Each structure stands twice: as structure tokens, then as C-alpha cells.
Amino acid sequence: IATDHISHLPSEYGSIVSICVATYSIYAFVSNAVLVRPLGEMGRLRITQDLANLELALEQLVFKAGSSSSLAQMDNGKAYAELRAVRQMLFWSLLSDDESLSPSDIAKSLLRETWIVDVRPSTICHFLFSFAPNLLSSPHHA
């Protein structure tokens, strides 16, 4: 993308376009990654590796487009912070450890996590949806 398309734009526009593409890519990937179910240990590790690969690819895209900012500086750092927080969120295992918790106990436990402030509410809802029983079909199956 950077070589074929963004490089043909004036440098100030190329930088803006690359940042928009990177931000959208992070949000889209994260939103879909947290919906994966059932998610075992190997799946968590694969998604974590995919998040690292995405981060590296987008960092290169932004750099090749001529932007002086990094992923951590784009959109006030919100997209990058969510990307980093999702890595931790994937390994939050309260729901898989104890299925007898009440919704208020789950909410309290979630709010105690340090990464919760960096994750959008929709991403948290998607993540919680991934723990639903198979009776509730996934959004991409509906």
C-alpha cells in the first residue's frame, strides 16, 4: 500500500492516509479477534502473535508513508493502547475458571483490571460474548 498508493500522494497527505489506515486496521482487527470462540491457549497465543505482526506491519506502513509519528502517537495513542490492552485481555481467565460468578462479580472483576481503561466498551462486549454458550450463535454465523 505504501509503495503503490500512498507514495504517489503529497507527503502531508500520505502521512494522514497512513495514520487513518493504521488506526482503522487496529480497531477492525481487535474487534474481530476478541469474537473468536472457543478460544483455547493455543488460539490466544496465535492471536497475540497476529497482534504483534499487525503492529510491526502498521509501524512500517506509517514509517514508509513519511510520517514522523509512531503508532503510539496516532489518535492520541488510543488505538495503540487498545492493541496493547487486548493482549492482556485475551489472557483474562476469570470466566473460564469459575462459571458460577454473578454478572456483578464479573463486572467488578473487569473494572479492577488495569487494561480496562484502554479498551472500548464495544470491544469488551465482544470479548464477553466470546464466553457465551454455543446456544448463542456468533455474529458471523447469524
Image (spheres, rainbow, N blue to C red):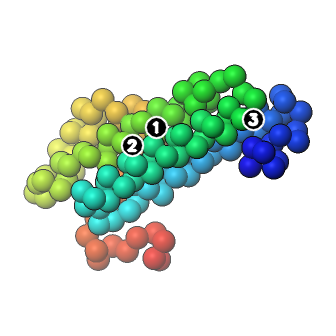
- Residue 128 in picture, x, y percent from top left: 32, 54
Compare residues 47 and 110 and report the one nearer the observer.
47
Where disc 3 sits, the SS reads loop
Q: Residue at x 75, y 35 (%)?
A: 65
Q: Are marks 2 and 1 in contact (CB under 8 Å)?
A: yes
| Three-letter amino acid code at the position of disc 1 | Glu
Q: Nearer the N terminus, badge 3 or badge 1? A: 3
Q: Are marks 3 and 2 in contact (CB under 8 Å)?
A: no
Q: CA distance from mark 3 to mark 2?
A: 26 Å
Compare residues 124 and 65 and report the one nearer the observer.
65
Compare residues 102 and 25 and report the one nearer the observer.
25
Task: Tell me if 35 is positioned left or right of 133 in this view.
Answer: right
- Residue 29 in picture, x, y percent from top left: 52, 52
The residue wearing badge 1 is 82
| Three-letter amino acid code at the position of disc 2 | Val
The residue wearing badge 3 is 65
Visible residue check, residue 125: no
The residue wearing badge 2 is 86
| Three-letter amino acid code at the position of disc 3 | Ala
Closer to the eye: label 3 or 2: 3
Label 3 environment density (alpha carbons within 10 Å; few <14, some 14–19, many ≥20)? many
Compare residues 24 and 51 and report the one nearer the observer.
51
Q: Nearer the N terminus, badge 3 or badge 2? A: 3
